[in-house]
Amino acid sequence: MSRLSNPISDQSDDQSTSSDLLLPDKQTHGTVQTEVQTSYAGGNNEKPRLLTVSFSCVVIVQSWLMYGLSVGYISPVLSDLEGSGGNSSAPLDKLVYQDLFTVLPAISGLVSVVIAGWVVDKIGRKPSLLVCSIAHAIGWLLVVLTLLTEGTMFRLLLFVGRFSAGIGMGFASLCAPLYIAELTPRRIRGFFGTMTQLSLSVGVFIGQLVGTYITYYWLAVIILMVTCVFTVLAISLKETPRWLMTQKRNHEAREILVWLRGKNYNVDKELQEVAEQLELENKTKLNFTETVQEFKKKSVYYPVIIAAILAVFQQCTGVVGVISNAEDIFKQAKIKSPGLLSSIALGGTQIVAQIFGTILVDVLGRRVLLISSAVITSLSLTVMGTYEYLNSEPYCNPSTGSGCKDHLYPLAIAAMACFIAGFSIGLGGIPWIVTAEIIPLKVRGVGVGIVSCVNWVLIIIYAGLFRNYEDAVHPWGAFWSFALITFCGAIYIATFVPETKGKSLEEIERSFL
């Protein structure tokens, strides 16, 4: 992002304005003067229309719906493939196959995030989103084709398909928040930013619910069809004006911004602000050496560090452990179909909470929701840890049930629901918004890529080591340790994370200078 003094903004907002906008032009490889006439009825007070930007953002967040479907696909179909009934010829009859099936998307997601940070700046936001959709489509097509194979070829197609879907997940995790942050007006940027996490939750919920009733194959067919629809819609999207201006395609940037904001909105003030920022930063693209030098500046590395640590606290809430133990708690409550009910209860709670978060993020601000989320999450984890402690030895004899506090399960379920709601309303999605907002435009692709890489590394660690950690410190120890870490996260957010509500991306960047 970049800036300079704005001749347009120096004029009264309630007057029609006419200004000469100096923008670098790609065709002349220099600076040309383009006369900008702005005599709209609403002047600068005219609000941007929301229809086109809303359509664009709804399409973009479908990349996270695909992400969620890929995650939700794991739990309900694994029993189809693992031979839980003792079938030694089942495709995933060995534990190593099951672990590979689960972890492969996270591994490829990490690999793709490393690449995506460069790709998203090199080819643009829209082409990067199309890479995401194509990777998903190839992955699910390969899973569908497993119906025609068996044995080693079955596993090869399944694993390559999961790996390809993981590439799509990695691109989505980086590209979508960045795309939305650069397309949306500041007053609704948070609203659409939180829709990524909402779409992820909806995808997980649908995948788990539908997968309960149909086989792995037909669920893959449904996801492939959804992916094809998403790809077609993604083709209709526009590139972000900010990225186009970094490529000196200013005329095209203006046309797209008029299409997004409406003909009656004065787009020149917004364009001027971005142009000034780009001019202030640098007139040349950064090579690898220059990028490394750029990261030595506090105004660049400091926001990246803030976002990366925020990502650490997001993953260290222990959400993996809560979801993993949810079915066990429902079993202790002697509820029929505990797996299905826990999926519906937790998935429903998560979606409702994220809807509230989506509404409140531009009302209360990022920091208020993040701090509230961390505190609620920490308290819920403490209660859940206490419940697990009271139902463990020496207080409880699992074989006889003597001394067990199973009657406290309503408290555990309530704490679990509060945890999911608290996590979803803030820590679940807002860190992605803040990351896309605070990292400077010049290194935003690389910076967001670094943060996403940190996120994916933690996902792989949790997926591969959580059960071992839980066995080592007991479930109650795991919950209590997560509660302490999350409480420290609340202190960190209150101390270091800036409020970005109502600020332009240019204003946010200036605050780190």
Image (cartoon, rainbow, N blue to C red):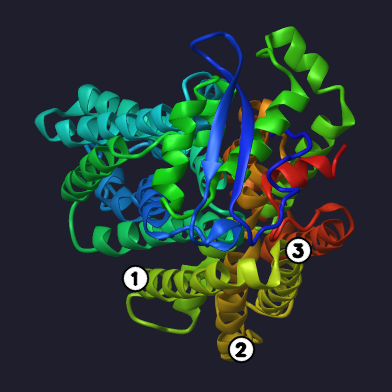
Mark identifier at residue 408 = 2
Q: Position of residue 245 (x, y in %)?
A: 56, 27
Q: Amino acid at mark 3?
A: Arg
Q: Nearer the viewer, residue 419 or 450?
A: 450
Q: Residue at x 73, y 16 (%)?
A: 291
Say what secondary structure mark 2 lies in: helix
| Mark 1 lies on residue | 340
Q: Position of residue 119 (x, y in %)?
A: 51, 21
Mark identifier at residue 367 = 3
Q: Nearer the viewer, residue 44 or 372?
A: 44
Mark 3: few/some/many CA within 10 Å (<14, 14-19, 20+) = many
Q: Residue at x 52, y 51 (%)?
A: 39
Which quarter of the rendering shows the N terminus? top right
Q: Amino acid at mark 2?
A: Leu
In the picture, measured across the screen, residue 442 lies left or right of residue 221, that is: right
Above or below, 250 against 471 in this view is: above
Look at the numbered discs 2 and 3 and tell me whether their residues touch, using CB distance below 8 Å: no
Pointer 1 or 3: first along the chain: 1
Residue 114 is at least partly visible in this image: no
Q: Nearer the viewer, residue 23 or 467?
A: 23
In the picture, measured across the screen, residue 218 lies left or right of residue 390, that is: left
